[in-house]
Image: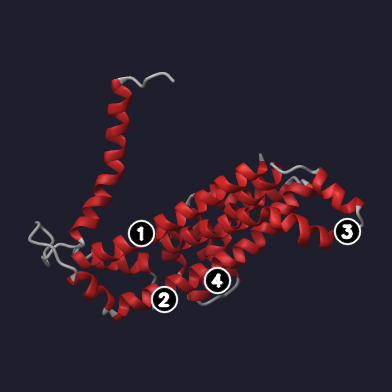
Amino acid sequence: MRKLPLWLKLAAGATFAFLYVPLLVVVAYSFNDSRLNAEWVGFTFAWYRVLFNDAEMLLAARNSLFIALVASTCATILGTLAGLAIHRYRPRWLPLLVITPVAMPEILLGVSLLVFFIQVLHLTLGLLSVVLAHITFSIGFVAIIVRARLAGMDESIFEAARDLGASPWQTFRLVTFPLILPAVVAGFLMSFTLSIDDFVITFFTAGVGVSTLPLQIYSMIKIAVTPEVNAVSTLLMLLTLVLVVVASRLDKGFMKGGE
């Protein structure tokens, strides 16, 4: 294996430092024993106790978890069906419809959904509108993951099931679904992560009185970046990291299985 040149190592180190040092600072200052958060005073867990006693923050966390669970569950079902349809029937229009919300800028998608909900559906903005918006942009990610899994599978497996007399439903239940299950779970975790972290689309579709963790953090930092903001950001970062690692390992698992 050829050794990397020094300039490439330095460039990589500078890039990773630019990406991750600010995150480490946020984590470190969530333990800072200072309300102003301007300089390091001492180590404390007090801000985590304040966080877990903050009624508004707990309500925002419950809303975020509810939205993420419902949206990712619906998106996983619809995205799996879309991935199967794209792979099996190869329609020209379906991939475009599925991938467009993924490729579209978030601010454009948020404004479009806001106009659609208000002017077309005459829907009052609230938790329902946020859930529908999150389902919309999550379906494409699940469909892409499931479609990639199906593309790496041997078609003779399904042909053998049909030759042995299995109905289409039996083939799906006993052969197809167990094989694509890791991709389905990875798609669920990915859509859950995207949903719980989303700010832009949620900002346009939440309406008055509905708060999620990203919206609550935004409202708090408009006043000041307190250690409580750092604490909730740290927990949200940790949750996101865990979900991304699990989804990544599942993705690697089914890619090896496809080989």
Closer to us: 91 or 115:
91
Res. 107 in view: no
Which residue: 31% across, 38% down? 16
In the rendered structure, the answer to whether residue 212 lies left or right of residue 133 reads left
Which kind of residue does numbered mark 3 sit on? Ala
Looking at the image, tell me whether mark 4 or mark 2 is earlier in sequence order. 2
Quarter of the image where the C terminus is located: top right
Q: Counting other residues with Cα less than 10 Å from the Cα at mark 3, is it few (<14), some (14-19), or many (20 or more)?
A: some
Q: What numbered label is drawn on residue 204?
A: none
Could you say which quadrant of the image residue 119 lies in?
bottom right
Q: Return the x and y of residue 159 as percentages of the image width and height.
A: 86, 47
Quarter of the image where the N terminus is located: top left
To which residue does mark 4 refer? 70
To which residue does mark 3 refer? 166
Which kind of residue does numbered mark 2 sit on? Arg
Look at discs 2 and 3 and give the one toward the viewer: 3
Which kind of residue does numbered mark 4 sit on? Val
Look at discs 1 and 2 and give the one toward the viewer: 1
Look at discs 1 and 3 and give the one toward the viewer: 3
In the rendered structure, the answer to whether residue 135 lies left or right of residue 243 reads right
Could you say which quadrant of the image residue 40 lies in?
bottom left
Please tell me whether mark 3 sits on a helix, a strand or a loop.
Answer: loop
Looking at the image, tell me whether mark 1 or mark 4 is earlier in sequence order. 4
Which residue: 64% across, 45% down? 257
Please tell me whether mark 4 sits on a helix, a strand or a loop.
Answer: helix
To which residue does mark 2 refer? 62
Q: CA distance from mark 2 to mark 3?
A: 44 Å
